[in-house]
Amino acid sequence: MMVDQHGPVDVLNHTQLLDQGERAAVALAKLGVRPGDRVAVLLPMSLESVVVTLACIRLEALRLTLPVGDHLGFIRHRIRTSGARVVITAGSCSVDGTVRDVKSGLDRALWACPDVHSVLVVQQLARPVPWTPGRDVWWHEALDAGPVPGGPYAGVMSSTPEQPAAPSSSRPVPAVAPASLIFDDPLERRSADDTDQGWGDRPAEDGTPGDLIRFLNEKPPHHL
């Protein structure tokens, strides 16, 4: 469940979702996530999980999804072999009516993962959360730190493509092509090999066989 200045929310509109994705991208970049890096994610189905995916797309990072449950050995193995240095986890969550203390289990798995330097913790239930100072960071606090209007990621995750604004600080920004989310209908676009005439409407070049060859070569055959 997301938390904003007005308290917990379980619904985000389109603009709010993209803003959260922007903020998460900034937060991960500040933690050193760069293109090609793995970000380990230990979350149930939630809005935060969607936001993490948007942030990874923006940074061209790779999301490593980990299972919620009693899989400590597997989680430890996946984090170590992937080289992930940042983990995003729930403090605790409810799965099929059972409360799981996700963060405490993750801490046990991280005993053998010295490369992990940052853990972002999503507070979904009002329960105590074990804490490692200097490593653990509250998710909502990390997202509250940015971005600001006109910041380095402003506009790069929107419903129409546009160029990002210039960086507002000296911190290097990942040199990646701006990401954009486009929500138009691809079926409304005209195919490069299409015309206003359907199959069989245009005259055959060399009779029926030629018309059949043209039909088979269309990619895809639109006019069935």
Image: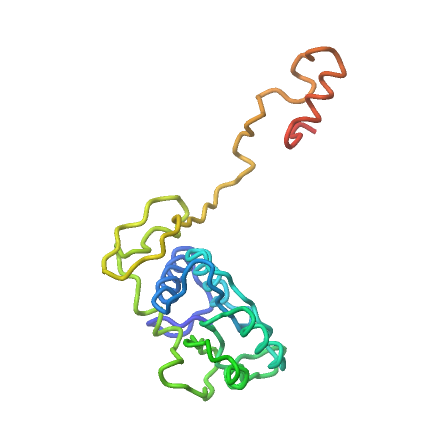
Colour theme: rainbow
- Taking the image as shown, residue 19 lies to the left or right of residue 45, namely left
- Taking the image as shown, residue 174 lies to the left or right of residue 39, namely left
Q: Is 49 above or below relative to 105?
A: above
The structure residue drawn at horizontal position 62% and vertical position 77%, both measured from the top left corner, is 74
Q: Is 46 above or below relative to 131?
A: above
Quarter of the figure with residue 27: bottom left
Q: Position of residue 170 (x, y in %)?
A: 23, 60
The structure residue drawn at horizontal position 42% and vertical position 58%, both measured from the top left corner, is 59
- Taking the image as shown, residue 160 lies to the left or right of residue 41, namely left
The structure residue drawn at horizontal position 51% and vertical position 63%, both measured from the top left corner, is 63
Q: Position of residue 208 (x, y in %)?
A: 76, 15
- 186 or 73: nearer the eye? 73
Quarter of the figure with residue 9: bottom left
The structure residue drawn at horizontal position 53% and vertical position 29%, both measured from the top left corner, is 190
Q: Is 21 above or below relative to 138?
A: above
Judged from this view, the residue extending furthest toward the right is 209
Q: Position of residue 102 (x, y in %)?
A: 53, 81
Query: What quarter of the picture does the C terminus occupy?
Result: top right
Q: Position of residue 49 (x, y in %)?
A: 50, 66
Number of residue marks: 0
Q: Is 15 above or below relative to 191?
A: below
